[in-house]
Amino acid sequence: MNLQLHNNVPDGLTRRARSFVSAHGIKVDVTSVEGLREWWLERDIPTEVIDRMAAYQQRWGGLVLPPGPKYEGGPKYFRPDVPEGSSSEGWSFEAGDQRTSVPFSFMIGPADEFGIYSHQKWTPLHASVEGWVESLALAHHASMWAKQITKFTGDEVDGIRLDAYEPVREVRGLADKWWRGTDSLVAVYSGEAESLSFPAARTALIYSGLDDWGLRGGVEDSDV
């Protein structure tokens, strides 16, 4: 497998995420979607679905990023595979292989959401792959600058008061969301709880003791 630094960072990311991908991303070779196009067509996969997979591979294919704090780190690398769905429900496809043995697959949804699929249930985590990458970048950044990181699980998460916090828009949160306060960041991960119908899996991480750089990493709302 060919490894190289990932210098061609996709556009549409904040400066913080671009720096994260440039500094920590590795590119590996993956199987071409175009090489399998006829194989997919013979199995009645719609052309537009294969086109979406090809566009995903061109933008993200082969990118390896450091593991995130949940979902056993996230995909090992981005690689489209195994499209499934219908004209009525929409089509999804695999986003990449799991790093470890987890009871779900990483998927790209009918509207290009990034999420997980388990037990016949689709749970979108972020509205786009960019949102997932932004979340990884923010978790990496916050963990470096926080004076303290506190973890809450299950029912404990409901006790976190977010009235004085604002949503972090760049993560495009759906089941998983980030919130920014005056000196802390809060990440709430609900994907596994929803997908597995297991409320105890809900997790929140509070990164506290942050200055303005720690809170934003140079990213302002105008940059999003």
Image (cartoon, rainbow, N blue to C red):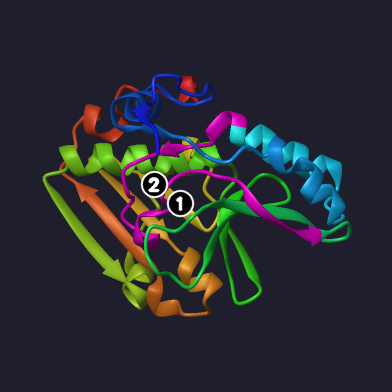
Pointer 1: what residue? 177
Mark 2 or 1, closer to the camera: 1
Q: Position of residue 5 (x, y in %)?
A: 34, 25
Q: Residue at x 47, y 69 (%)?
A: 192
Disc 2 residue crowd, few under 14, some 14–19, many 20+, Cα 10 Å: some
Q: Residue at x 19, y 47 (%)?
A: 208
Question: In the picture shown, does residue 105 fall above or below 31?
Answer: below
Q: Secondary structure at mark 1?
A: strand
Q: Residue at x 48, y 37 (%)?
A: 62
Give the alpha-carbon distance from disc 2 to disc 1, as whole Å.
7 Å
Q: Residue at x 45, y 78 (%)?
A: 199
Q: Tell me, yes or no, whether the two marked residues, 2 and 1, touch with CB atoms within 8 Å.
A: yes
Q: Is residue 168 visible?
A: no
Q: Is residue 174 visible?
A: yes
| Label disc, if present, on residue 75 of the rendered structure | none
Q: Position of residue 33 (x, y in %)?
A: 67, 39
The amino acid type found where label 2 is placed reads Trp
Compared across the picture, whether 113 is left or right of 211 comes to: right
Total label count? 2
Residue 79 forms part of the magenta stretch: yes
Q: Residue furthest left?
A: 147
Pointer 2: what residue? 179
Quarter holding the N terminus is top left
Q: Nearer the viewer, residue 215 or 193?
A: 193
Q: Position of residue 135 (x, y in %)?
A: 41, 43
Question: In the picture shown, does residue 104 fall above or below 130?
Answer: below
Q: Secondary structure at mark 2?
A: strand
Residue 148 forms part of the magenta stretch: no
The quarter holding residue 82 reads bottom right
Question: Which stretch did the figure color magenta?
Answer: 58-85
Q: Position of residue 112 (x, y in %)?
A: 67, 44
Q: Nearer the viewer, residue 78 or 212?
A: 78
